[in-house]
Amino acid sequence: RKEVEQDPGPFNVPEGATVAFNCTYSNSASQSFFWYRQDCRKEPKLLMSVYSSGNEDGRFTAQLNRASQYISLLIRDSKLSDSATYLCVVNHGGRGSTLGRLYFGRGTQLTVWP
Amino acid sequence: DTAVSQTPKYLVTQMGNDKSIKCEQNLGHDTMYWYKQDSKKFLKIMFSYNNKELIINETVPNRFSPKSPDKAHLNLHINSLELGDSAVYFCASSQGMGGGALYFGPGTRLTVT
């Protein structure tokens, strides 16, 4: 089983739509969670961290459900510029060989059309 | 101001050659990484260094050898390149190893012919 699993999409939505991405992780000891965004032929960039109580940054809302080992990202009022691949990322924390390891999902592709 | 830079951006070379990719970060971070992104877009860690000390050494062929002359630089040398090495290689840095966010370089697109 992969460390981090995401629905690869693609998601094709019109401008203004609300879209949600989901992600599950396999290691219950995971400690840190992130969403990254990767534009075509570019490097991944941190979009937002995901906190236990859920957090919001403008049109973006991230949720974490530790019991279900599930992370979500909600984008409201989609813009054309939101078109990208969204990567779910999990850090196991811990010690030894797992320290510092970030595990990336394969990414969910989003296209917002006018 | 480029936070994490890599050179070269593109690298086309023939099988059997030896090549190096260089990475530098000016963020003052103490941890640097090499990630490989294959044709299926899957990002996988290869190595990480903390204050010039090798911390993570994933199961990669020993043809790949990282070198960190100081905590702001992490280079990757690849010997005897193979077709399967074709990928995008990303350098990244973070402050500490405990799960902080990564800052990626622009990537080096390696094509082995």
Image (cartoon, rainbow, N blue to C red):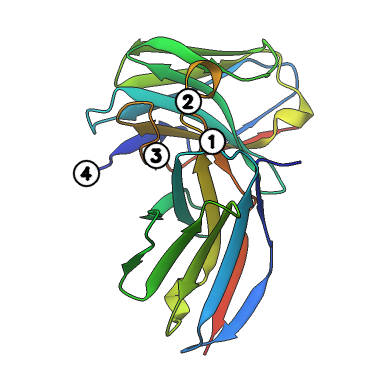
From this viewpoint, is residue A107 visible? Answer: no
Q: How many marks?
A: 4
Can you tell which of label 3 and label 1 is closer to the viewer?
1
Q: Position of residue A55 (x, y in %)?
A: 35, 63
- The kind of residue on which mark 2 rests is Gly
Residue picked out by circle 2 = A94
Q: Quadrant of the N terminus of chain B?
A: top left
- Labels 2 & 1 near each other (Cβ < 8 A): yes
- As drawn, is A2 to the left or to the right of A53? right
Q: Which residue is mark 4?
A: B1
Q: Chain of mark 4?
A: B
Label 3 and label 4 in one chain: yes
The residue shown at (33%, 27%) is B24
Q: Please state the chain letter of the residue tagged with numbered disc 3 in the rendered image.
A: B
- Where in the figure is residue A66, as x and y percent of width and height? 52, 51
Whether labels 4 and 1 share one chain: no
Q: Which mark is residue B3?
A: none
Whether tag 2 and tag 4 are in contact, CB under 8 A, the answer is no
In this rendering, the answer to whether B40 lies above or below A19 is: above
> Could you tell me residue A28's position as x and y percent?
58, 40
Q: Residue A22: tell me if it is visible.
A: yes
Q: Nearer the viewer, mark 3 or mark 4?
A: 3
Q: Residue at x 39, y 71 (%)?
A: A60
Q: Secondary structure at mark 3?
A: loop
Amino acid carrying label 4: it is Asp
